[in-house]
């Protein structure tokens, strides 16, 4: 009768686990960076018109008034891997220029204090430019 060899168990060991954790951490950070880039306005997106070419159907458009000036707060979707509490948001002034933006709203960052503490008026996307220009 032949002896069968027992399968040898491979032991990863503590250094193997550290290596695996480092690799998975790197992959997660790489994906988070790609997500960040996905919501960062690319070069050439500097006003409402070019923004809407880049993000044609934003789910939320709101008018806000800060220090007597009108602004448009445009929300995008919530980034998947960023673990954000709220959507990415972009702010435009009366000239339609992009003046502020944040990828992770709802985190208590200065963006939230500056824009989300103000009363918001829903504005239909089709009349966003007119809302900014109206007195």
Image (cartoon, rainbow, N blue to C red):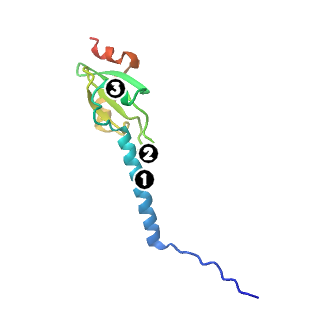
Q: Residue 49 occupies which quadrant of the picture?
A: top left
Marker disc for residue 28: 1
Disc 1 or 2, which lies upstream in sequence?
1
Could you tell me if the residues under marks 3 and 2 are in contact, i.e. CB atoms within 8 Å?
no
Front residue of 123/116: it is 123
Q: Nearer the viewer, residue 52 or 82?
A: 52
Where is residue 117? Give x, y as percent: 33, 28
Q: Which residue is mark 2?
A: 81
Question: Marks 1 and 3: which is nearer the front?
Answer: 1
Q: What label does residue 73 carry, if any?
A: 3
Front residue of 19 and 105: 19
Outermost residue on the bottom side: it is 1
Distance Cα–Cα, label 3 vs label 2: 23 Å
Image location of residue 84, percent across then percent down? 41, 41
Q: Quadrant of residue 102?
A: top left
**Residue 97 appears in which quarter of the rendering?**
top left
Work out whether 110 lies above or below 118: below
Assign a secondary structure to mark 3: strand
Q: Is residue 117 visible?
A: no
Mark 1 Cα shell of 10 Å, populated few (<14), some (14-19), many (≥20): few
Q: Secondary structure at mark 1?
A: helix
Q: Label 3 near label 1: C-beta < 8 Å?
A: no
| Labels 1 & 2 near each other (Cβ < 8 A) | yes
């Amino acid at each position: 009768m032949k002896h069968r060899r027992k399968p040898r168990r491979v032991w990863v060991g503590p250094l193997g686990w550290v290596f695996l954790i480092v690799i998975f951490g790197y992959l997660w950070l790489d994906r988070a960076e790609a997500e960040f880039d996905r919501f960062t306005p690319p070069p050439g997106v500097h006003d409402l018109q070019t923004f809407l070419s880049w993000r044609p159907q934003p789910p939320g458009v709101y008018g806000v008034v800060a220090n007597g000036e009108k602004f448009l707060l445009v929300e995008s979707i919530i980034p998947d891997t960023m673990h954000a509490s709220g959507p990415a948001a972009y702010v435009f002034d009366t000239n339609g220029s992009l003046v502020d933006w944040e990828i992770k709203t709802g985190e208590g960052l200065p963006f939230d204090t500056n824009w989300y503490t103000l009363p918001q008026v829903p504005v239909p996307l089709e009349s966003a430019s007119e809302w900014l220009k109206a007195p």
